[in-house]
Image: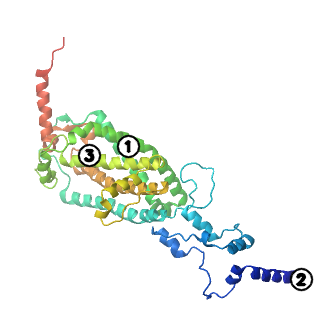
Amino acid sequence: MLTRLMAVVTLIALLGTNPALAQSEGAVDAPDAPASDATTLEDILARQRGEDVERTNRAAEGSSAEEQARGMLGTLGGASDSLLWEGLRFGTADITTQAGGPAATVLVQDGGMLWVGWREGPLRTYGGYLLLGTIGLLALFYLIRGRIRIDGGKAGTTIERFKPVERFAHWLLAGSFILLGITGLITLFGRVFIQPLLGKEVNAWLALGSKWIHNNVSWAFMLALVMVFVFWVIHNIPNRTDIGWMLKGGGLFSKNSHPPAKKFNAGQKMIFWSVILLGGSISLTGLSLLFPFEMPMFAATFEKLNAFGIPGLIGMEPFPTVLAPHEEMQYAQLWHAIVSFVLMAIIIAHIYIGSLGMEGAYDAMGSGQVDLQWAKEHHSLWVEEKQAKAQSAPADATPAE
């Protein structure tokens, strides 16, 4: 009984000597009551939506009496929960860490919620629709047009289309891109499709393996991209014959109609430059993700776009030019995935034409030898050049001594 009485007396004494505590014990509707220092739900949700939220600087607003009360009654040494989380959220908390490197002390980066929303929303939705839509359109085209046959029938003789080193570069590029595409899709869609069917443990192992394969096979992709560019760039420069090929749709939509073309027709040139430009962009953002502190890309890119007034042309505010490493990685990952989806759709169409869609096309990268009649129908100007060189070679050759 005596203990309880002493506790009551102590509490009354505290209330009498600390106006802040006495006021907090008063009526809620008191006009002079200070605003709550708690972070509101709307504050958190606004920041998660990517909206600017003004910092209240509650620590500077606190009175000495309040600080004294927190020191005596609180458990955080003079800082409330709201002050602590505000400091973490705005990067001003007093944090020490043994980890080195930029942004090592960033514990809360709730701006990443915008990235999560894009990744789990539009990226998955529209990326999936793009791939499924491409496959559906190709299936419809096959049902309507059927396989493109060799109109004149096979000649029975062949002509060399690609050398072994060229085919090696092509298959290295194709194989690495397929692996990168599959592992990227597992990473993006694993929790949606694999985890409900096979469980969290299987999805975790697949995700871990996909990450390892993706990071390491990327080097083969970049090497092959350089090789393909060096081998074929000279043959993929646009020329006047490409206009006629485009006007006739490459003969894909009508039988017995094959516009003249050199070693690469206009359609193949579009595939080539798509692979080089989009593949190059994918490679750069991939390197930025592998080395985020050494290769930040988007702050400098946004600065140049702002200088040219690009955001204003599309009705947007200027892009941010000061980005934390986390934000650099988030932008890089989104761009990496978006461009990859576009390139995957293009490559699916390329695979269709090179296999099921056109008779004799696979031989170009299979054995390197194509049927002469097929070559005359699809690359007539190239065949004429090859035959002209073959006929002039003996006359121009110098006899061995």
* Element at label 3: helix
* Element at label 1: helix
Q: Is residue 200 left or right of residue 309?
A: right
First in residue order: circle 2 vs circle 3:
2
Q: Is residue 380 left or right of residue 317?
A: left
| Residue under label 2 | 2
Q: In this view of the protein, which residue sits in the foreground, 131 or 373?
A: 131
Label drawn at residue 247? none
Question: Which x, y percent locates residue 82?
Answer: 61, 71
Q: Is residue 178 visible?
A: no
Q: Is residue 325 above or below residue 364?
A: below
Label drawn at residue 272? 3
Q: Name the image quarter holding the N terminus.
A: bottom right
Amino acid type, mark 2: Leu
Question: Which x, y percent locates residue 235?
Answer: 21, 39
Measuring 22% from the left and 57% from the top, which residue is drawn there?
142
